Image: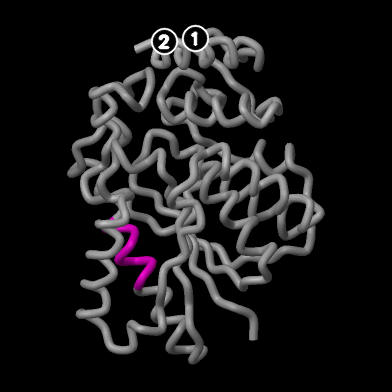
Amino acid sequence: MKKQAVLSLSGGMDSSTLLLHLLSKEYEVTALSFDYGQKHNVELERAQELIDYLAEKGHNVTYQVIKLDGLVSLLNSSLVTGGDEVPEGHYAEDNMKATVVPNRNKIFSSITQAVALSIANQKNTPVQIAMGIHAGDHAIYPDCRQEFRDADYEAFKQGNWDAHQVSYYTPYLYGDKFDILQDGEKCCDTLAVDFNEVYAKTNTSYKPTEEGYSDYKSASSVERIEAFIKLGRKDPVQYGDENGKVKWIVAKAHVQSVLLKYSAE
């Protein structure tokens, strides 16, 4: 029997790369996405596109979207429909705390743990919960820190029989988006899939345009574009603003100016 993994797949660059990583290591993957009323729900479309593309290439994944959109009116965050405007800039800025969704990863984690334990019991085999969290998440998002993971896992073990069959797999925990992209390149080669096709089917933007183009000014986009600059590759997603499509060279120049500002401080 193949190794088993349950993946929280947002449709973003990190979790999408982790999906490739798991497939390249011959895991049988169950991927879960969550619809919680996020403004950037284009990420769910991208996740489905990636799942479909991988299936065409012979890499099948069990995929399920979990509907939590009833929470939208109850959550206070700039990321959910009805919330304040998503701030622009760098994650170093204090106003980026507005992008925190209260207890989001705990909500996702509880569901993911339940699915993982169910698979473990049904198949009588260990299951790993795979998460694409990385070092860049730690400062602004407390529920991406190892301390939170450890406490959450301990609560899971205290509350469930046979919880020892479930463990966590977080290969990017101490890396950054550049490290993730480097791993993505290797995994694309291993799986014989096209790098540009894969990453065109991801969304990192918290402020996509009405046409579904990624913005290039929100912190999540700045971090992604920085990684592609370091890798020396053009990002295959289409960037845009209120005036329509924006060329890669424009998005790249904007991010370079933002990075220059913070390196000088």
The one of 91 and 5 positioned closer to us in this rendering: 91
User: Left or right of 190: which side holds 4?
Assistant: left
User: In the image as oriented, which residue stretches furthest toward the front?
Assistant: 264
Q: Quadrant of the C terminus?
A: top left
Q: CA distance from mark 1 to mark 2?
A: 6 Å
* Residue type, numbered disc 1: Ser
The quarter of the picture where residue 211 lies is top right
Could you tell me which residue is drawn at 66 percent across and 64 percent down? 23
Q: Position of residue 197 (x, y in %)?
A: 73, 40
Relative to residue 114, is residue 20 depicted above or below?
above
Secondary structure at numbered mark 2:
helix
Q: Position of residue 250 (x, y in %)?
A: 61, 10
Residue 103 highlighted magenta (yes or no): no
Stretch in magenta: 106-113
> Which residue has dot 2 on it?
261
Q: Which mark is residue 257?
A: 1
User: Given contact means CB atoms under 8 Å apart, are the residues at marks 1 and 2 in contact?
Assistant: yes
Q: Crowding near pointer 2: few (<14 within 10 Å), some, many (20+)? A: few
Could you tell me which residue is drawn at 24 percent across and 49 percent down? 71
The quarter of the picture where residue 245 lies is top right
Relative to residue 105, is residue 226 depicted above or below?
above
The one of 184 and 99 positioned closer to us in this rendering: 184
Q: Quadrant of the N terminus?
A: bottom right
The quarter of the picture where residue 89 lies is top left
Could you tell me which residue is drawn at 39 percent across and 49 percent down? 35
* Residue type, numbered disc 2: Lys
Q: Position of residue 31 (x, y in %)?
A: 52, 62
User: Left or right of 122: which side holds 49?
Assistant: right
